[in-house]
Image (tube, rainbow, N blue to C red):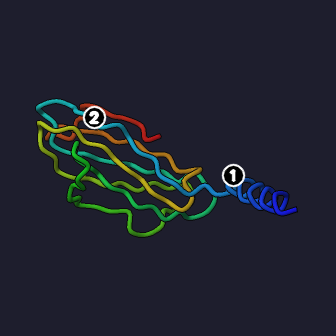
């Protein structure tokens, strides 16, 4: 009897685990060129409801890079938000997006030169 109660509880937890879409998506660390000067992480909300996100641009050691913009307010349905930062030219960078509802959030990191011409880009997964 006790084993069936435990198995029922475990089955219930596993069944509910698929309902939650909370999580994180991140890009790989990318290096553009010696001309890279800016990093921009663009986050899109493809759901029908506002989504609160926490967006970070990180250096190759995993340290957050100070950014000039943020996505402090929830992103409205079918809108985008962008976070930009000035970056060094000899370092790889990544972008991380955390949200309580990540299922319909898409994002990309783009490294640009001083004229804001894209040098390299990567999707977050």
Q: Which mark is residue 108?
A: none
Measured as percent of width and height from the top left, residue 49 is found at 61, 63
Residue extending furthest toward the right: 1
Q: Is residue 58 left or right of residue 37?
A: right
Identified at 29% across, 51% down, the residue is: 57
Left or right: residue 21 compared with residue 109: right
- Work out whether residue 94 or residue 35 is closer to the camera in this orientation and state it: 94
Residue under pointer 1 = 18
Of callouts 1 and 2, which one flags the residue occurring earlier in the amino acid sequence? 1
Residue at 53% across, 54% down: 45
* Secondary structure of the residue carrying numbered label 2: loop
Within 10 Å of the Cα at label 1, are there few (<14), some (14-19), or many (20+) other Cα atoms?
A: few
Determine which quarter of the picture holds residue 3. Answer: bottom right
Residue at coordinates 83% horizontally, 63% vertically from top-left? 2
Q: Nearer the viewer, residue 105 or 82?
A: 105
Q: Is residue 85 left or right of residue 78?
A: left
Tell me the CA gap for discs 1 and 2.
31 Å
Residue 4 position within the rendered picture, expressed as x and y whole percent measured from the top left: 85, 58
Residue depth check, mark 1 versus mark 2: number of the one nearer the observer: 1
Mark drawn on residue 30:
2
């Amino acid at each position: 009897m006790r084993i069936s109660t435990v198995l029922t509880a475990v089955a219930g937890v596993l069944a509910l685990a698929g309902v939650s879409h909370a999580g994180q998506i991140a890009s790989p660390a990318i290096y553009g060129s010696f001309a890279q000067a800016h990093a921009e992480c663009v986050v899109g909300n493809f759901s029908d409801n506002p989504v609160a996100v926490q967006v970070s641009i990180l250096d190759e050691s995993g340290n957050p890079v100070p950014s000039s913009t943020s996505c402090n307010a929830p992103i409205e349905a079918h809108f985008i938000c962008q976070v930009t930062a000035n970056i060094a030219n000899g370092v790889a960078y990544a972008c991380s997006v955390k949200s309580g509802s990540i299922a319909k959030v898409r994002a990309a990191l783009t490294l640009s030169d001083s004229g804001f011409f894209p040098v390299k880009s990567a999707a977050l997964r």
